[in-house]
Amino acid sequence: MGRTARQVYGRARAAAASVARLRPGQGAPPAIEHRDRVDSALLLVARLELDEPAVPDGGTHRDFLRGERFVACPRLPAGATHMLPTPWRLSWGSEVAGHDLRRSRAAVAADAVVLAKHDDPRAGLKLRSAYVDDARVVGVVPDVPGRASTALRVATSHAVVGRYAPYLIPPLLAMGDLPAGSGRYFVEGWVTGRPLMSPRRLGEAVGPLCDALTQVHAGYGTSALPLSRAPGAVTAGQWAVVRALGLVPDAVAARVADLVERDVRVRCSWTHGDTVSSNVLSSGDEHVLVDWENAGFAPVMSDAAKLHLFAHDGPRALADLLEVFGRHRHGATCTAGEELALSHARLLAAYPARRRRLHGHPRAEAYELQVRRGALRLAEALAA
């Protein structure tokens, strides 16, 4: 990490530390019956609306439609429906949208409050609330014991990306601590756009996204680190498990094992960490990345690998990203294709643990297909 990058990171830490905790509200938030995850989320949003000046005030009861992990206004503007879970994001406002929903009332100003798909049982609620007319979104991120602070990742992303590629991240309007120090909240400006959502549209965006990401890398600084020292890189032990499971052909597995054994140097910089289509908004002629909660200092190809994995046309996406990431090597001791393959290898290394978590889950079959596609993409990268 260069001197400038250390200064930016230090400023982000200082900014995060200097934000005062939420002031106690003048009155208790309105009581909401039948306490569950959604009720708890509404109570938290009501508290934020009372105490954070950058968030519109609530207090008036309004009608909502309520699902398992969200509430939303019946006439939610079309530009905000992308926040909703599937299938409602595609059918809101139609008769289909009322399926499995119930009517509810709450005293919040938000047009929609959506809980994260997977909550960590060790942490508090993770959610987003939208205020369409006021052009802002609030994100709440809890602190998870034993893990790097998610809030610090987001704060650092705003400091770094907001400086070197401001069009790539929503503008930060305010941030602060949650009550009792259980996490942080961020108030961001509204981005007019819709998630790409489809593999075909994501593939078309690979080139421009990679160009934007390299601007972040250039500003933050890029370091070529031995694979064994690169945060989040695949290890020899992890790859041995992948080989034992037979996820990739022997010849491909042997080439990856050789790169790992040689401890090749790979480029590392500030990365988004989850460049899936739902986190890429198309806004006019530009693309905006949202949900920087998995961001961090990591191999630059970790973002490229997910773009390559989920793009419809793998060969085209590969050509586009290698054209961008092949321009400047910054001391890497393997080819750009080999760097990409190593990031694909790290994604495959997550298979054993994730397979156990998804056992019996409806998404288990889709994940198996994703792993097989990842093995093919890894081979494509090595052959480039």
Image: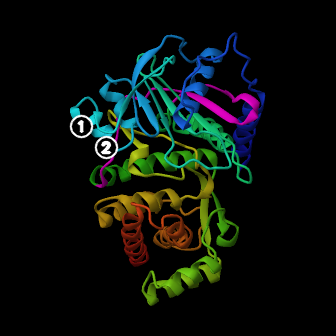
The disc placed on residue 96 is: 1
> Which residue is situated farthest in the front direction here?
34
Q: Which residue is mark 2?
A: 87
Q: Residue at x 41, y 36 (%)?
A: 67
**Magenta stretch, residue numbers:** 171-199
197 is within the stretch colored magenta: yes
Checking the image for residue 112, the label placed there is: none
Under tag 1, what secondary structure? helix
Q: Nearer the viewer, residue 72 or 280?
A: 72
User: In the image, is residue 308 above or below residue 68?
Assistant: below
Identify which residue is drawn at 58% across, 39% down: 126
The three-letter amino acid code for the residue at tag 2 is Pro
Quick check: 88 left or right of 57?
A: left
Query: Residue 189: x percent and y percent?
Result: 49, 25
Q: Look at label 1 and name its amino acid.
A: Val
Nearest to the eye among marks 1 and 2: give it: 1
Q: Could you say where residue 39 lies in the image, as x and y percent from the top left?
A: 54, 30
Residue at position x 52%, y 45% in the image: 215
- Gap between marks 1 and 2 measured at Cα: 9 Å
Question: Which element type, helix, strand or loop, lies under badge 2?
Answer: loop
Mark 2: few/some/many CA within 10 Å (<14, 14-19, 20+): few
Answer above or below: position of 176 versus 331.
Answer: above
**Front-lying residue, 281 or 176:** 176
User: What crowding class fits label 1: few (fewer than 14 Cα within 10 Å), some (14-19), or many (20 or more)?
Assistant: few
> Which residue ends up furthest to the left in the rendered image?
95
Of residues 257 and 86, the one drawn nearer to the viewer in this rendering = 86
Q: Verify CB contact (< 8 Å) between mark 1 and mark 2.
A: yes
Q: Residue 205, percent across and down? A: 34, 49
Residue 15: quadrant of the picture: top right
Vertical position of residue 367 compared to residue 165: above or below: below
